[in-house]
Image: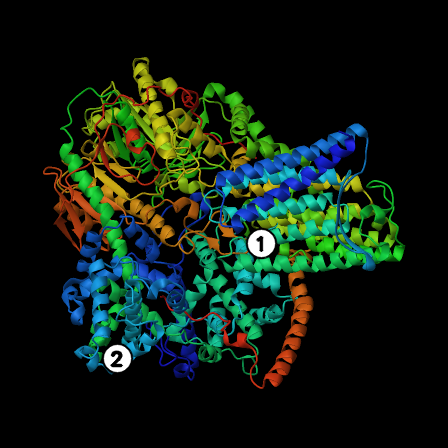
């Protein structure tokens, strides 16, 4: 067996094992043949271990052969020659994707083992693991993506599963509302991503990263775009990354995403999901080099997010929000590192941060016990030590800063006021126009849905 | 809600604004009076808020404590009205219990008869008595669905083709044959002639059926035809009786009305802001940056924060101006509430209700503010007095602004809110009354089950019809659930009391034999099985149950603890301070270790904080990959990790030999050196109190072991709830240790001798600690065990070790993730693994399934299998005085404590989302005070779904060994106990110490118990009885010899029962 075939087989296995897991969970549920908790546990274990083993296998092979970029072709799934369009699935193993996919398997696998006991006897156990499989598949596909459409496929799966897991407790209103909130921010990011992908196709005729970045394995590739094109496409990709990684001004969804079960919060918002945006920037980092302005904007956005995140983290009084904003701080710094061109640093930073935050979030329910133990060890009550802000700044400015942090920068309100409201107003106007028109044509009220009461009906005690 | 008709005079205040408008002088007085009144309303409302304090000091208490003045059933209905929480289990759950025999039909009959009283035998037309009609509604699985569900059932199921499965064949055949006669012999049928409507219905129906009814119709066609006809007739009957309009109470608050009328949710944005403010205000040291100005109160801090802000959110735009206006006007929070109420147009007679509802809107947070303000002087940051009022003032200001903003299209110019509610009320669509189909479907099902033929029904006069329909509709779902619930409880009470009666009769008279040792544990239900197993392993030992603080009410500081914490029931304020110190000879090493702990602790605290900051975060994240090691080992190899951390801990924890500072000379008690400990007199009081309570005043064994208890688990914010309730959520080991030391002291014994209590010189007391989560038992001060007693101690320890293993087996059967066929050693390993597992949401089941409390001599019930469901309090009625003073003081503690636990479990089970704290999976620890769901939810009190999932919601049944007269006397003497029993918050039975006859307390009187069964299964051992079974187990007498059924005695367990003495801090970070 040649090395090529081995690469191909291992690469396929790495991507196929989560896909198979998703198919097994999805199909058994679809045909009302639910698996037992034990069986699901075993399936998850097998899939993760297989995936992990084959990606490590590839890593070893790459180290042995000195190969720096291993593409695995999955062919064109859609091709429209006259439009010069093809939907091309391709995986690529390189210095960026291999560490990231190993990290994914490791963290998702560990969290799976955790969740398996944590969610024991839970009515939504199967739903959770279905979404878990979807997330794993999305992460693996996104990290290994060799073309922009492959990346988008993974990106979407991650987004969908994350939003559904935020709304996991769908019998209460607030998880559902917050799940929708996350979802709508993700849609904005997705839209930006799609436009960027189309633009890339338009410019280069294909979405293949290799074509885009010219020759050379990550991170040495050279993009074949002009500076202006790079700025345009890069900005769109930056919007996509900002939405996914909760950078300014999209940060508001991050604490809201803490509605799901603790393990999903840990893996998604602490560790992997939130890094997907920065991963995208790393993946297309060749574009960043082409435009000074683009790099500058990335650095500024990253730094602004980091400062904002660290401020907000200081005032949170609950552990999950505190950790969410601390994550955000680091994600901001990672973004800035990417903008500055420190790619390996960013990668190491990302991996370390993901591991640390997962551990912290999984341990979050222990907070009271941990504090108690610390108090006993130190021998006094743990009191927050005033930070730099508190020592150097005048009380009025302190209060302003505190308020800014307390209000989470007011970004949610800004988005609500200046994006959501105009958007809704416009579509409500369209709706009114359409209704007037159809009523006129029908000669009567034309909307059957109007008759269904939308507001909840007053209920007595019984 | 009445709408401003006239004002009610309250508290002797002068009335109204207009009356006093001309008297400027008196208006100041009136104003003060009004504010007083408001303050009074708020204080009153505050008592309705959850009274759970900080989660680190979790004390079980009756969730509906404020309603204890009411009878139980009235109180749960109040709870439904005020909190919107379920009073009983869902009807479907009770029906399922009926189907599987957990609720018995004869009990249903009894309870219904008692409930109806004289009204039971009223005749409802030809249908029989009310009793029969209602019983039919209870006994059969009727569907009381919504309109849509009914229509679906009629259209899509064979509800109109087949009789209900529960219909007796006789009745079905009769109904079908009557219909057949009616149709085939129509001309002769006088009934049909008399009723043209029926004839017409039959004619219409016949058109829908194919073929000639005379010859071709099969039985099933006839059945379908009968049912169709019956259905039509039921609809006619119901149609002729107008339905009762649904009683809908509209909410009183504007925000709720706005939501109902328009779907605009004002509550959520207001709540989110208030939650953040309350969390920051109450924070006990989590946030790195505390709310500026919080020491000056909630209102001030809020004003200072927002008075010069420029909010982006539309609804908050007016906030700064409003706050400045209030500040300039110099309004106090109370005055601001007064003003807000006026601006909102709230009348005086509804003020109290309005304020109550406003507080209940975020009842977890409001309750915590109140607790921190009134009941937490020991906390790091108690809230200043008046916090709840200030919170309410802010809340009303925010609500006003939000309403003004969101309801602006509905408001008159100028945004006047006073008329908003009447406007909204008029816009709320009324809930549709139950439709004819919905109402008819119940009648239709009943008609099948009771065998009413269509013609019979149709023949009723209008009067009779309305009587019937009204009667059916009068038996509301709430009422049905109440009956079911009582039958559900009665079934268990019957099993329990019958079992006790039979077992007591079987019990041989205890013989005087040499006792190997005596074991005293807490009364806790988790110790029931432990004691039982100890007794089974060694038939010659005796066990006792006493409240687990062993009368040593103290502030305690362990050698590795930073602070004193109370170890006594929450209602007791300890008067003494006790500290554990390293043995003098080890002082140097102890100091070094403390230094090491401090260094490591400081470092890990730094790491903890820094990882959340900007620069520290970079550093920690760059080395964050190292975190993958603990991450993976902790989750994938929890036992190995636990072992390693224990090993590490043993190097830095206080040295293993410690002693208590227990003896005080003359100084007043206090936390400083001279004030630590008890005087000899006080020690003698403690020892005497416990020994008298449990009736251990003579026949001492040579060895008496006392075990305090607690529970240790990981990743569990509710950890304190699993600890000893008698130690306010602390671990009771130090209490047992202190007690043993006191009882061993010759000076104390001398004192006791003077008081007439003789402790033989040969008796030695040993204190210990039982961890109910991993079933580990540690003993204290073993080096002091005299040589003469060591052999005995070792034997006793072997017995206890064997019992630990068996106890673990019995516990494991309730854990679904534990295999059923575990051997004792394996079971111990399983429960140890649970306690060390980060991902374990059920380290143990705590008090779940509790349902009994036995107060009396253990010899009466020893050997009765109680399935870990009973609190066991020892009390010797034969040694009590004529005033029953021992019983009175035993019950003064046992009744409120056990009732509190039982009722908290009851309410969290019947409505886990409302009274309980929901699933623990999304819980988020906030302000180091409690848990909430998500990042801005209400603070959740009560028990989680994972804690109550195997619980059966029942009021606890006390079985007390005394006479009815004595019991009555105790109830009369103690209003708290008397109220709980008289209002039926707990069930009560007494067991006569002499005659062994049982009396139950029902509706204010003791009535003799009517035993239903004469047999009680026997089994060789507890393990035989529970082998291979998961669910609740019935009672049984254990008659086997004491020989262990498993030949292999536990060996693996020895290593765990190390003679550790230090109850120090656990591993850090």
Residues packed near mark 1 inside 10 Å, few (<14), some (14 to 19) or many (20 plus): many
**Position of residue A415 measured from the top left corner of the image (x, y, whole percent):** 67, 64
The residue that disc 1 covers is A164
Residue A409 is at least partly visible in this image: no
Quarter of the picture containing the N terminus of chain B is bottom left
In front of the other: label 2 or label 1?
2
**Position of residue B528 measured from the top left corner of the image (x, y, whole percent):** 30, 34
Tell me the SS state at disc 2.
Answer: helix
Which image quadrant is residue B64 in? bottom left
Circles 2, 1 touching at the beta carbon (< 8 Å): no
Residue B689 is at least partly visible in this image: yes
**Position of residue A324 measured from the top left corner of the image (x, y, whole percent):** 62, 49
Q: Nearer the viewer, residue B133 or A76?
A: A76
**Position of residue B866 measured from the top left corner of the image (x, y, whole percent):** 27, 37
- Height in image: A219 above or below B246? above
**Relative horizontal placement of residue B911, taking residue A7 as reference (left or right):** left
Please name the residue shown 29% across and 26% down the image: B534
Q: Chain of mark 1?
A: A
Q: CA distance from mark 2 to mark 1?
A: 58 Å
The residue that disc 2 covers is B199
Residues packed near mark 2 inside 10 Å, few (<14), some (14 to 19) or many (20 plus): some
Which image quadrant is residue B14 in? bottom left
């Amino acid at each position: 067996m040649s090395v090529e075939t081995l690469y191909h087989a291992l690469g396929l296995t790495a991507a196929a094992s989560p896909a198979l897991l998703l198919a097994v969970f999805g199909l058994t549920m679809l045909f009302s043949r639910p698996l037992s908790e034990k069986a699901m546990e075993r399936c998850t274990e097998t899939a993760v271990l297989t995936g992990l083993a084959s990606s490590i296998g590839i890593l070893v092979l790459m180290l042995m052969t000195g190969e720096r970029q291993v593409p695995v072709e999955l062919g064109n799934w859609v091709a429209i020659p006259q439009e010069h369009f093809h939907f091309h699935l391709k995986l690529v193993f390189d210095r960026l994707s291999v560490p990231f996919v190993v990290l994914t398997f490791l963290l998702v696998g560990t969290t799976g083992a955790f969740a398996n006991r944590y969610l024991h006897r839970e009515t939504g156990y199967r739903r959770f693991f279905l979404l878990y499989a979807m997330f794993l598949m999305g992460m693996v596909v996104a990290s290994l993506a060799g073309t922009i459409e492959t990346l988008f496929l993974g990106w979407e799966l991650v987004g969908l599963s994350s939003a559904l897991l935020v709304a996991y407790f769908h019998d209460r209103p607030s998880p559902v509302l917050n799940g929708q909130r996350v979802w709508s921010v993700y849609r904005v990011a997705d839209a930006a991503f799609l436009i960027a992908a189309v633009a890339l196709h338009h410019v280069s005729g294909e979405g293949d990263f290799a074509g885009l970045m010219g020759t050379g394995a990550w991170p040495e590739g050279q993009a074949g775009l002009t500076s202006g094109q790079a700025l345009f496409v890069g900005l769109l990709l930056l919007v996509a990354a900002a939405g996914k990684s909760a950078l300014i001004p999209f940060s508001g969804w991050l604490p809201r995403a803490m509605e799901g079960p603790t393990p999903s919060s840990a893996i998604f918002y602490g560790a992997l999901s939130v890094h997907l945006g920065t991963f995208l920037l790393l993946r297309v980092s060749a574009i960043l080099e082409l435009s000074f302005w683009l790099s500058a904007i990335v650095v500024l956005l990253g730094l602004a997010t980091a400062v904002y995140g660290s401020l907000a983290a200081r005032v949170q009084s609950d552990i999950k929000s505190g950790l969410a904003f601390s994550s955000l701080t680091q994600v901001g710094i990672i973004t800035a590192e990417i903008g500055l061109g420190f790619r390996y640093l960013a990668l190491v930073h990302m991996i370390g941060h993901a591991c640390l935050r997962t551990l912290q979030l999984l341990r979050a329910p222990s907070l009271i016990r941990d504090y108690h133990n610390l108090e006993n060890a130190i021998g006094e009550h743990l009191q927050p030590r005033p930070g730099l802000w508190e020592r150097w700044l005048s009380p009025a400015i302190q209060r302003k800063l505190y308020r800014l942090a307390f209000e989470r920068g007011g970004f949610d309100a800004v988005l609500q006021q200046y994006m959501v409201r105009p958007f809704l107003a416009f579509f409500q106007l369209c709706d009114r126009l359409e209704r007037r028109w159809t009523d006129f044509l029908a000669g009567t009220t034309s909307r059957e849905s109007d008759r269904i009461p939308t507001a909840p009906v007053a209920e007595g005690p019984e | 809600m009445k709408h401003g008709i006239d004002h009610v005079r309250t508290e002797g205040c002068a009335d109204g604004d207009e009356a006093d408008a001309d008297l400027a002088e008196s208006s100041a007085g009136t104003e003060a009076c009004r504010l007083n009144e408001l303050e009074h309303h708020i204080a009153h409302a505050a008592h309705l808020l959850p009274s759970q304090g900080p989660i680190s000091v979790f004390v079980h208490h009756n969730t509906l404590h404020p309603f204890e003045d009411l009878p139980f059933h009235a109180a749960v209905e109040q709870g439904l009205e005020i909190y919107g929480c379920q009073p009983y289990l869902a009807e479907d759950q009770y029906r399922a219990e009926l189907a599987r025999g957990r609720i018995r039909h004869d009990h249903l009959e009894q309870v219904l008869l008692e409930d109806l009283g004289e009204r039971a035998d009223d005749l409802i037309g030809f249908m029989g008595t009310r009793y029969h009609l209602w019983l039919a509604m209870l006994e059969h699985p009727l569907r009381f669905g919504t309109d849509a569900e009914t229509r679906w059932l009629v259209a899509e199921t064979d509800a109109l083709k087949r009789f209900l499965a529960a219909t007796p064949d006789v009745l079905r055949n009769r109904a079908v044959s009557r219909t057949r006669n009616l149709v085939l012999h129509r001309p002769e049928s006088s009934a049909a002639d008399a009723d043209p409507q029926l004839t017409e219905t039959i004619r219409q129906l016949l058109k829908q059926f194919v073929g000639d009814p005379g010859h071709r119709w099969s039985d099933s066609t006839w059945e379908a035809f009968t049912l169709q006809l019956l259905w039509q007739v039921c609809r006619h009957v119901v149609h002729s009786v107008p339905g009762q309009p649904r009683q809908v109470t509209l909410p009183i608050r504007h925000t709720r009305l706005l939501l109902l009328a328009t779907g605009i949710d004002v509550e959520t944005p207001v709540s989110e802001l208030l939650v953040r403010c309350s969390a920051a205000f109450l924070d006990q040291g989590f946030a790195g940056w505390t709310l500026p100005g919080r020491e000056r109160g909630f209102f001030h801090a809020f004003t200072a924060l927002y008075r010069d802000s420029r909010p982006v959110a539309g609804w908050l735009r007016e906030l700064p101006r409003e706050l400045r206006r209030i500040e300039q006007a110099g309004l106090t929070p109370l005055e601001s509430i007064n003003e807000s109420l006026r601006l909102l147009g709230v009348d005086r007679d509804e003020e109290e209700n309005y304020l109550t509802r406003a507080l209940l809107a975020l009842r977890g947070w409001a309750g915590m503010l109140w607790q921190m303000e009134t009941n937490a002087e020991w906390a790091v940051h108690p809230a200043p007095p008046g916090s709840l009022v200030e919170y309410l003032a802010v809340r009303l200001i925010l609500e006003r602004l939000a309403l003004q903003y969101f309801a602006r299209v509905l408001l008159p110019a100028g945004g006047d809110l006073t008329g908003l509610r009447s406007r909204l009320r008029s816009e709320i669509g009324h809930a549709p009354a139950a439709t004819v189909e919905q109402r008819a479907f119940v009648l239709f099902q009943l008609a099948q089950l009771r065998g009413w033929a269509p013609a019979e029904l149709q023949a009723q006069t209008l009067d009779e019809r309305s009587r019937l329909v009204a009667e059916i509709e009068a038996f509301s779902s709430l009422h049905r659930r109440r009956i079911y619930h009582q039958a559900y409880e009665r079934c268990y009470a019957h099993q329990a009391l019958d079992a006790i009666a039979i077992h007591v009769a079987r019990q041989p008279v205890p013989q005087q034999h040499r006792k190997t040792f005596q074991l005293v544990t807490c009364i806790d239900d988790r110790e029931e099985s432990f004691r039982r197993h100890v007794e089974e392993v060694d038939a010659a030992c005796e066990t006792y149950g006493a409240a687990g603080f062993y009368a040593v009410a103290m502030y305690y500081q362990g050698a590795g603890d930073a602070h004193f914490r109370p170890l006594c029931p929450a209602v007791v304020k300890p008067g003494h301070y006790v500290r554990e110190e390293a043995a003098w000879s080890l002082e140097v090493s102890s100091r070094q270790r403390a230094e090491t702990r401090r260094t490591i602790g400081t470092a890990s605290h730094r790491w903890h904080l820094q990882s959340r900051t900007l620069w520290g975060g970079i550093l920690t994240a760059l080395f964050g990959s190292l975190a993958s090691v603990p991450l993976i080992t902790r989750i994938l190899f929890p036992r190995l990790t636990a072992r390693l951390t224990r090993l590490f801990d043993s190097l830095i924890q206080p040295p293993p030999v410690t002693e208590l500072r227990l003896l005080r000379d003359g100084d007043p008690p206090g936390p400083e050196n001279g004030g630590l400990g008890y005087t000899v007199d006080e020690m003698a009081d403690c020892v005497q109190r416990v020994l008298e309570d449990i009736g251990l005043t003579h026949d001492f064994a040579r060895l008496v072991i006392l075990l305090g208890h607690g529970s240790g688990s990981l990743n569990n914010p509710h950890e304190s709830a699993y600890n000893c309730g008698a130690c306010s959520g602390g671990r009771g080991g130090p209490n047992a240790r202190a007690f043993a030391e006191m009882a061993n002291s010759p000076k104390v014994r001398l004192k006791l001798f003077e008081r007439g209590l003789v402790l033989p010189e040969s008796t030695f007391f040993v204190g210990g600690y039982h961890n109910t989560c991993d079933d580990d038992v540690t003993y204290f001060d073993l080096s002091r065990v005299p040589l003469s007693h060591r052999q005995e101690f070792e034997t006793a320890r072997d017995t206890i070790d064997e019992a630990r293993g068996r106890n673990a087996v019995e516990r494991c059967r309730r854990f679904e993730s534990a295999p059923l066929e575990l051997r004792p050693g394996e079971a111990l390993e399983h429960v140890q693994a649970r306690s060390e597992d980060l991902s374990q949401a059920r380290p143990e089941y705590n008090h779940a399934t509790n349902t009994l409390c036995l107060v009396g001599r253990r010899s009466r019930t020893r050997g009765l299998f109680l399935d870990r469901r009973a609190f066991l309090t020892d009390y010797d009625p034969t040694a009590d005085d004529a005033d029953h003073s021992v019983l009175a003081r035993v019950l003064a503690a046992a009744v409120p404590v056990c009732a509190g636990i039982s009722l908290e479990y009851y309410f969290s089970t019947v409505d886990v989302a409302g009274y309980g704290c929901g699933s623990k999976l999304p819980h988020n620890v906030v302000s180091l005070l409690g848990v909430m769901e998500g990042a801005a939810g209400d603070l959740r009190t009560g028990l989680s779904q994972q804690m109550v999932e195997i619980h059966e919601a029942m009021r606890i049944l006390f079985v007390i060994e005394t006479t009815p007269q004595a019991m009555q006397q105790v109830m009369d003497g103690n209003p708290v106990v008397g109220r709980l029993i008289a209002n039926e918050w707990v069930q009560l039975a007494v067991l006569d110490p002499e005659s062994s006859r049982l009396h139950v307390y029902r509706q204010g009187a003791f009535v003799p118990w009517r035993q239903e069964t004469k047999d009680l299964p026997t089994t060789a051992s507890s393990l035989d009885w529970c082998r291979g079974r998961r669910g609740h187990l019935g009672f049984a007498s254990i008659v086997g010899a004491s020989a262990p059924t498993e030949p292999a005695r536990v060996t693996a367990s020895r290593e765990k029962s190390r003679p550790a003495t230090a109850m120090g801090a656990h591993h850090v970070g």
